[in-house]
């Protein structure tokens, strides 16, 4: 996992590149590499607050390495990413909570994301497990990631299920010599439980860091 910086739009912005190598695949909601498919890397690239480019896919591809992978954008501070491991599952999160949002909002309600408050507001989560997973288990793992994220945000004092622009990626090997692919990714399955605990820890740390972002440091 490599953190780098670039100068763009008058700001110093960070990018986090997680390279899995060949023989991996991922499920993701990201603009680049979304769906289920091969993934040799995951890129989480920081952009300026108030980002207004109309070609985000091209922008991500300019920053990404060659080959198949998953690319996400966020205005949250990528350099302040949080990371947690549990039993071989690993989670990395960048947490920005400018507009904490409930998933189910009344129809016709004003979109708070359009408020002119230029602070980062996205929770991006990437997870890797060392075991192969079926398509259904990958879908289940995304559900587990989302549930663990929401649990962490509520525990940190944010009344929300996340933000309207959150993205997720779960990566796993195509096949492993230890045995067949996992069939389950729910929070009470072996690997789903590990994913849940890793995501919960990473997001909880990130949410506390966001809440205390203006606190003086010693």
Image (tube, rainbow, N blue to C red):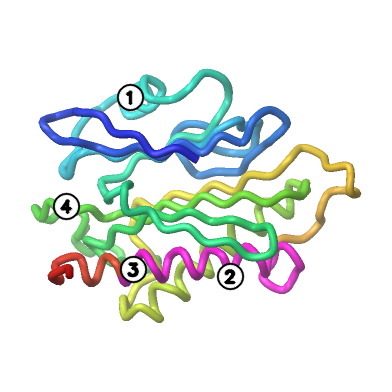
Q: Residue at x 61, y 36 (%)?
A: 20
The residue carrying mark 1 is 59
Q: Earlier in the sequence, mark 2 or mark 3?
A: 2
Instruction: Measure the alpha-carbon separation of dots 2 and 3.
Output: 15 Å
- In this view, 3 is above or below 56: below
Q: Quadrant of residue 152?
A: bottom left
* Up-down relation of residue 112 to residue 72 (above or below): below
The secondary structure that most of the magenta stretch takes on is helix
> Looking at the rendered structure, which numbered label has been put on residue 197?
2
Element assignment for label 1: helix
Disc 2 to disc 4, C-alpha distance = 33 Å
Judged from the image, the secondary structure of the residue bearing numbered disc 2 is helix
Q: Is mark 1 in CB contact (under 8 Å) with mark 2?
A: no
Could you tell which of marks 1 and 3 lies nearer the N-terminus?
Answer: 1
Q: Residue at x 59, y 56 (%)?
A: 90
Range of the magenta residues? 186-208
Looking at the rendered structure, which numbered label has been put on residue 114?
4
Tell me if label 2 and label 3 are in contact, CB under 8 Å: no
CA separation in Å, label 1 and label 3: 27 Å
């Amino acid at each position: 996992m490599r953190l780098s910086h670039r100068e763009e739009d008058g700001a110093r912005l960070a990018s986090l590149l997680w390279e899995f190598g060949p023989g991996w695949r991922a499920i993701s909601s990201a603009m680049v590499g979304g769906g289920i498919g091969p993934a040799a890397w995951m890129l989480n690239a920081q952009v300026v607050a108030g980002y207004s480019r109309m070609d985000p896919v091209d922008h991500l591809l300019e920053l990404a390495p060659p080959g198949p992978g998953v690319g996400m954008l966020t205005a949250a501070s990528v350099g302040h990413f949080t990371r947690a491991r549990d039993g071989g599952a690993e989670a990395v999160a960048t947490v920005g909570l400018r507009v904490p949002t409930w998933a189910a909002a009344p129809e016709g309600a004003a979109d708070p994301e359009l408020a002119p408050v230029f602070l980062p507001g996205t929770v991006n989560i990437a997870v890797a497990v060392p075991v192969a997973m079926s398509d259904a288990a990958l879908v289940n793992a995304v559900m587990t990631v989302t549930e663990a994220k929401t649990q962490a945000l509520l525990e940190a004092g944010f009344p929300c299920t996340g933000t309207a622009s959150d993205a997720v990626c779960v990566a796993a090997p195509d096949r492993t010599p230890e045995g067949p692919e996992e069939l389950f990714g729910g929070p009470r399955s072996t690997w789903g439980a590990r994913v849940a605990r890793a995501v919960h820890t990473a997001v909880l740390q990130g949410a506390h860091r966001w809440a205390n972002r203006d606190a003086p440091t010693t």
